[in-house]
Image (cartoon, rainbow, N blue to C red):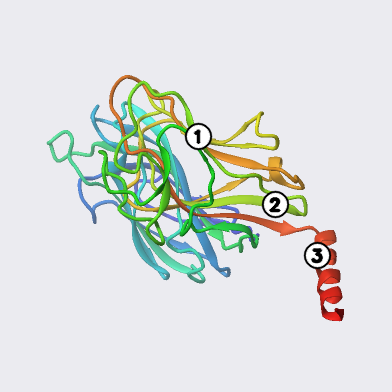
Amino acid sequence: MRKIALLAALPLLLGSVALADEVVSFYNIPVQTGPGMVTYNVDLTGGYTMGMLDWNGFATAFQQYTYGSELLLELSGPLGSTQIELGSGSSYYPGAWFSGTSGFFNQAGDPAGTWTFDFWDDYDDGGDGQPDAQWDEIHFTFNEYMPPPPPVYTFNLDTDPGWGTEGQWAFGQPTGGGSHNYDPTSGYTGDNVYGYNLNGDYVNNMPRYNLTTGALDFSGYTDVQLEFQRWLGVESASYDHAGIEVSTDGQNWASVWEHTGSAISDSSWQLMNYDISDWADGESTVYVRWAMGTTDSSVTYPGWNIDDIVFRGIPEPASLLLLGLGAILLRRR
């Protein structure tokens, strides 16, 4: 990994410093009600192929019903431009931490050059033409592209892999039903997904129901990762829940990811990646499950939709040797 220091002189900032791949930090940024009003330029050193863009930061709202999803960034530079939703869908007051990842520039090339950051709010909650929020701090990491491990198992869901389902988990084509941005009407690729209630929302007062893979063998692999396309709607974790868990015996489960904080309301497919190496590396029997629930007594969302599931891992040297010997024996037959 490259370690690069970046210092940018930006108005209204206390400072901006980049470390690691390249990190740009902003402080005390007032969010205006429209693009083109709070714009800063930063020069990236580059010299690498850019991968994901990550961000995290804390914003203070001046209006009680300011929504995190209203806080936006127009980002443009040598590799193109994109609009990024920096917050989440729920209202917050007086402030909240936000984080996220964008794969828009993944494998897009060298980011060297001038990048423009334009912070804005797409709705004036106060109705007074004044900022609704201020970013106390926010940090953007331009990550060097690292090729993922090769696939071990791929489930594109063109056909049903026959995984275990509970409650309203089902394999098939979603119908675009539900509320809060709705379900999709097809998979990320092809028609089918695994989803919770393919025809709409999950229900109130629901226990936890799971979609569970069959047994997966990673006995010859390290750095095992779970990758899939997600379209998820779930109310704030104060009320409703969703998660991902892993097990090596089907009885004892460890949390890979658990929904926390504000509501999630995907309106497009999101590529997700989770490191499950702590549990899966070298194991001959591994199960993964997606959980929906528990839920409270009011407000429902469309729940999980998942597609194009890939388990990745790096073959251990011994496994590569066995593969090579197997190929030699086959040629001699």
Q: CA distance from mark 1 to mark 3?
A: 35 Å
Q: Earlier in the sequence, mark 1 or mark 2?
A: 1
Q: Write down the residue under mark 1.
A: 210
Q: Write down the residue under mark 2.
A: 223
Q: CA distance from mark 3 to mark 2?
A: 15 Å
Q: Write down the residue under mark 3.
A: 320
- Judge depth for marks 1 and 2 and give the one in front: 1
Q: Amino acid at mark 3?
A: Leu
Provide residue 84's location: percent of width, then percent of height.
35, 52
Residue in the picture at 18% in, 39% down: 130
Q: Earlier in the sequence, mark 1 or mark 3?
A: 1
> Regarding mark 2 in the picture, which secondary structure is present there?
strand
Q: Residues within 10 Å of mark 1 (few under 14, many from 20)?
A: many
Tell me the quadrant of the picture where the C terminus can be found. Answer: bottom right
> Regarding mark 3 in the picture, which secondary structure is present there?
helix
Residue in the picture at 17% in, 40% down: 124
The quadrant in which residue 312 appears is bottom right
The quadrant in which residue 33 appears is top left
Q: Residues within 10 Å of mark 2 (few under 14, many from 20)?
A: some
Provide residue 187's location: percent of width, then percent of height.
38, 56
Question: On screen, 297 above or below 49?
Answer: above
